[in-house]
Amino acid sequence: MKLVVFDVDGTLVDSQRVIVAAMNAGFEQAGLAPLSPAQVLAIVGLSLPVAVATLLPQAAPEVHRQVVEGYRAAFFHLRQQQESPLYEGALDCLDALSGRDDVLLAIATGKSRRGLDALIEAHGWHHRFISLQTADHHPSKPHPAMLLAALSEAGVDAPAAVMVGDTEFDMRMGVSAGVASFGVGWGYHPRERLAQGGARIIAADYPALTRHLQEWLDE
């Protein structure tokens, strides 16, 4: 068996609008000026407390706490209004992989388990993934803990696994865990950062990603 591990935000789901709005709601709650979308998207992939600390390296812990709490409240409210859409071709890719008897699927995301559970419920993915790894019980990406846990749960060795993601943090996590790192070119980090992180390939769209994955699976 081989294991394909997907990131969520920026890889499967286009959550840019919600993430930017929620982060700026957190900044507003803490009395801070809003950030540009580029500033917010640069830290997507990190767990929320680490992301906030990265954006505000000189701020006091209390300010970090206020931003985190404001983000969580705003994100929950925005998600209740409308779930973020899947990228075009994402479902076809998952279907193609699920149709093989030599493939297991997993998720490794900086989202909370509550947020991931809501996404799975919205898209009916209850039986898609053998392992669901979130930021609740692991160090932030690019630490390899989430991937190592997914490998353990799936019973798959690192050389038989691939990490698919849109950020440099995803790529570095894959490298640290000893698995192949496949970048996607439609997410939140530019191709240059994906390459710097160790991406073996960078797919332009989901059909290209599916082809790359099929080729890797058939090696």
Image (cartoon, rainbow, N blue to C red):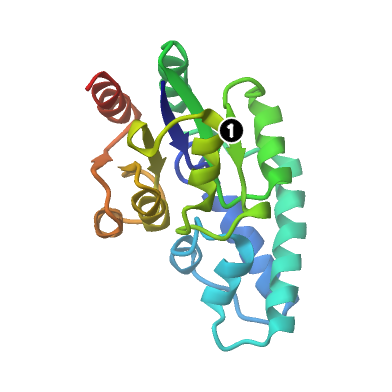
Check disc 1: other Cα within 10 Å, few if <14, some if 14-19, many if 20+. Answer: many
Q: Can residue 187 be seen in this view?
A: yes
Q: Is residue 101 above or below residue 47?
A: above
**Residue at x 76% of width, y 66% of height:** 69
In the rendered view of the protein, which quadrant contains the N terminus?
top left
**Residue at x 42% of width, y 19% of height:** 97
* Number of dots carrying numbers: 1
- Residue 38: x and y in percent read 43, 65
In the rendered view of the protein, which quadrant contains the C terminus?
top left
Closest to the observer: 103 or 71?
Answer: 103
Q: Within the image, what quadrant is residue 185 found in?
A: top left
Residue 74 located left or right of residue 193: right
Q: In this view, does 215 lie above or below 59?
A: above
- Residue 136: x and y in percent read 68, 53
- Residue 154: x and y in percent read 53, 29
Residue at the spot of label 1: 131
Closest to the observer: 21 or 206?
Answer: 206
Q: Can residue 88 be seen in this view?
A: no
Helix, strand or loop status at disc 1: strand
- Residue 94: x and y in percent read 46, 22
Residue 39 located left or right of residue 212: right
Closest to the observer: 185 or 101?
Answer: 101
**Residue at x 69% of width, y 72% of height:** 67
**Residue at x 62% of width, y 24% of height:** 125
Give amino acid for label 1: Ser
